Amino acid sequence: AQRVTQPEKLLSVFKGAPVELKCNYSYSGSPELFWYVQYSRQRLQLLLRHISRESIKGFTADLNKGETSFHLKKPFAQEEDSAMYYCALIQGAQKLVFGQGTRLTINP
Amino acid sequence: NAGVTQTPKFRILKIGQSMTLQCTQDMNHNYMYWYRQDPGMGLKLIYYSVGAGITDKGEVPNGYNVSRSTTEDFPLRLELAAPSQTSVYFCASGLGREKLFFGSGTQLSVL
């Protein structure tokens, strides 16, 4: 079955430190992967998609097909990065499935 | 432009009751989805729709029904509520699968 795994439920780092949120997937084919974020008291929203190869709010994510990973990285964490992060994968033709999520806390 | 609107925001049901969670969007999106999020867990897809008159099951459809009579509305019906359906429910819509816009959620407790 195609699935997304985020091994860390909680991640805590200090402001200014590098951040890496892990995401692994299982998919037979060319995956389409995304990172969604939910800030406190806000709605879940798209952060970035692998196909765009973009950097949003300093975050990047590289698709590694050999390791079946799509880790989210930021070189210097900021306090406003504290949020819940979800990795997501398009499954089949129309479905977007999510990982369990990682709660990131940036300590001052 | 309201985006995706879900009602109600909170609801407490007794076991065996039924209710409909409403979801409406004003962005003319074809794709609409219902997810549930249990405490400490990720989002699980309940049902989805790729256009008016078309619906399909997701990962956890049992105990739920949906309809899509218009592009704007995608209500989720719970028949015979059970404690296992206590969760936060999110509705989402998109022009395609790639970028979804989420509602603010409905927190449902079944006691």
Image: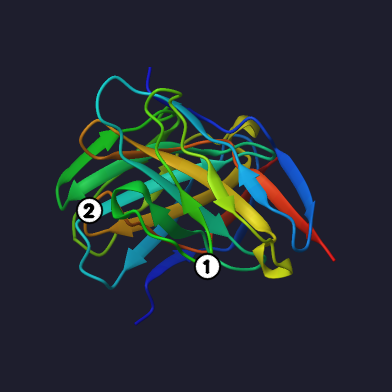
Chain identity of mark 2:
B
Inspect the image, locate mark 2, and give the three-letter code of the amino acid beneath it. Gly
Q: Quadrant of the N terminus of chain A?
A: top left
> Is there CB contact under 8 Å for labels 2 and 1?
no
Q: Position of residue B62 (x, y in %)?
A: 43, 27
Q: Is residue B13 visible?
A: no
Quarter of image, res A38:
bottom right
Chain identity of mark 1:
A
**In front of the other: A2 or B36:** A2
**B5 versus B83 height, above or below:** below
Inspect the image, locate mark 1, and give the three-letter code of the amino acid beneath it. Lys
The residue where tag 2 is placed is B96
Figure label count: 2
**In front of the other: B23 or B40:** B40
Q: Position of residue B76 (x, y in %)?
A: 39, 47
The residue where tag 1 is placed is A57
A40 vs B51, left or right, is right
Q: Residues within 10 Å of mark 1 (few under 14, many from 20)?
A: few
Point 14% across, 47% down: residue: B53
Point 35% across, 57% down: residue: B100
Q: Dot 1: what SS? A: loop
Q: Residues within 10 Å of mark 2 (few under 14, many from 20)?
A: some
